[in-house]
Image: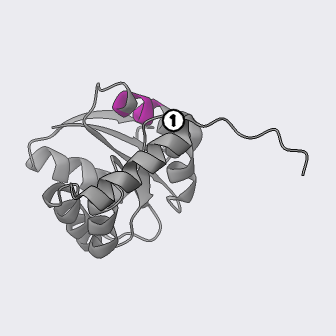
Amino acid sequence: MKIAVSTDERTPLVETLLNELKKRNHHVTYFGPEKGESVDWPVVTEQAAILVADGKADEGIVMCWTGTGASIAANKVNGIRAALCRDAETTKGARTWNHANVLAISLQMTDDTTLKAILDAWFATPYSNDDWNLEQITRIDKLERTPPSNSDT
């Protein structure tokens, strides 16, 4: 699977992630700094998210200190459903019910063991295809295509 990965800091967790993805035989396109550098999280997150939205990557994993900024930035790209996940159960829900195609991770709050559990859940959990859930995904897609109202209220 082709995975777009982004981070604003090259921490030990990033090294663990890249090694885990390699062990799982994924092809990684990396956006971010080398060791000892930092870059702006909206810039690298956008690069990874666009790769997913354009179909040049199957999925994405975006990271920043809290994971919140990366998830917000990724979700600004049409076609992206990014979910900030701090544990395996949240990850399963994001995949099952939200059809998340980008995983957001906190560099601060995630340890190596939790990261591996999140990745196990991410790659093992399929999207739900029941009628009710598909209707919810259609509603999300419609929200993305609906321009903001010009209401004066």
Residue in the picture at 54% in, 59% down: 68
For the residue pair 78 and 122, the one nearer the viewer reads as 78
Q: Where residue 70 sits: x, y (%)?
A: 52, 49
User: Which residue is disc 1 drawn over?
Assistant: 77
Callout 1: SS: loop
Residue in the picture at 84% in, 44% down: 151
Q: Is residue 133 visible?
A: yes
For the residue pair 103 and 152, the one nearer the viewer reads as 152
Hey, which quadrant is residue 94 in on the image? bottom left
- 50 magenta-colored: yes
80 on left or right of 96: right
| 136 to 150, vertically: above or below | below
Residue in the picture at 9% in, 49% down: 23
Q: Where residue 58 sits: x, y (%)?
A: 24, 36
Main SS, magenta residues: helix
> In the rendered structure, which amino acid carries the disc numbered 1?
Val
The magenta segment is: 47-52
Q: Where residue 88 sits: x, y (%)?
A: 27, 72
